[in-house]
Image (tube, helix red, strand yellow):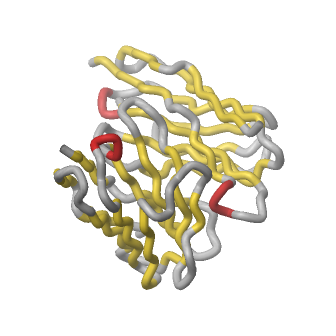
Amino acid sequence: EDQVTQSPEALRLQEGESSSLNCSYTVSGLRGLFWYRQDPGKGPEFLFTLYSAGEEKEKERLKATLTKKESFLHITAPKPEDSATYLCAVQMFRDNYGQNFVFGPGTRLSVLP
Amino acid sequence: GAVVSQHPSRVICKSGTSVKIECRSLDFQATTMFWYRQFPKQSLMLMATSNEGSKATYEQGVEKDKFLINHASLTLSTLTVTSAHPEDSSFYICSAKQGAGDTQYFGPGTRLTVL
């Protein structure tokens, strides 16, 4: 069964304390892996797309990496405004596009000043 | 670019009534739009995929007669919750795919409360 998990469930960091969030997946045929940020009461905001193992993407304090089994979202020197829930989603090769996009449960990040 | 809007942002209705939620792609044409539901502290669950000009594809367990989806144009999809009940109260989020790309861009969501 296709599965996407994220760890930790919640993470509290001090401002400037770097860390990594994990997204592990077990799917049949990865087409792409997506990272989103979601603030409370709002829709997810697109961050990165990764397509192949070894690929890396960076944006400000965030860097996403991908292996054959998992993806990491590295946060360098976080600031309080980085506090949010970070979601990963996996897209698989399927005939029916609509059934091939699965979200993980998310990691709630809190960055304390 | 790639902005998606939803209307309304919040709606409160009585049990048994119907509610329509609009999803618009503001600066691009979206051949495919998606509707998700999100319960508190849970992740997004795909309800259905909407393709312009054709019938929506619903995920297993989602009642197509209760959640009516119409994708009338390349920039507008609507979700109508018919005969709403308190258990339908949730956060409904749409997303749109731009052209042949894989990335989905999400709207801000609609908070539905059924009394």
| Residue B65 x %, y % | 46, 64
Residue A36 higher or lower than A113, as above or below: below
Quadrant of res B102: bottom right
Q: Nearer the viewer, residue B80 or B100?
A: B80
Look at the picture and state if A113 lies above or below B89: above
Q: Is residue B49 left or right of residue A3?
A: left
Q: Residue at x 23, y 56 (%)?
A: B9
Front residue of B21 and A48: B21
Residue A75 in the image, given as x and y percentages of width and height: 50, 29
Above or below for A100 versus B56:
above
Quarter of the image for the N terminus of chain A: give it: top right
Instruction: Name the quarter where the C terminus of chain A is drawn.
Output: top left
In the picture provided, is A51 more to the left or to the right than A47? right
Question: Is residue A68 placed above or below B9 in the rendered structure?
Answer: above
Count of numbered marks: 0
Q: Nearer the viewer, residue A87 or B114?
A: B114
Q: Please provide percent x and percent y for residue B63.
A: 50, 56
Which residue is depicted at the point 37% across and 52% down? B92
Say which residue appears at 77% left-offset and 64% top-offset: A95
Residue A46's spot in the image, x, y percent?
48, 52
Left or right: B103 as drawn, with respect to A83? right
The image quarter in which residue B89 lies: top left
Q: Residue at x 46, y 77 (%)?
A: B71
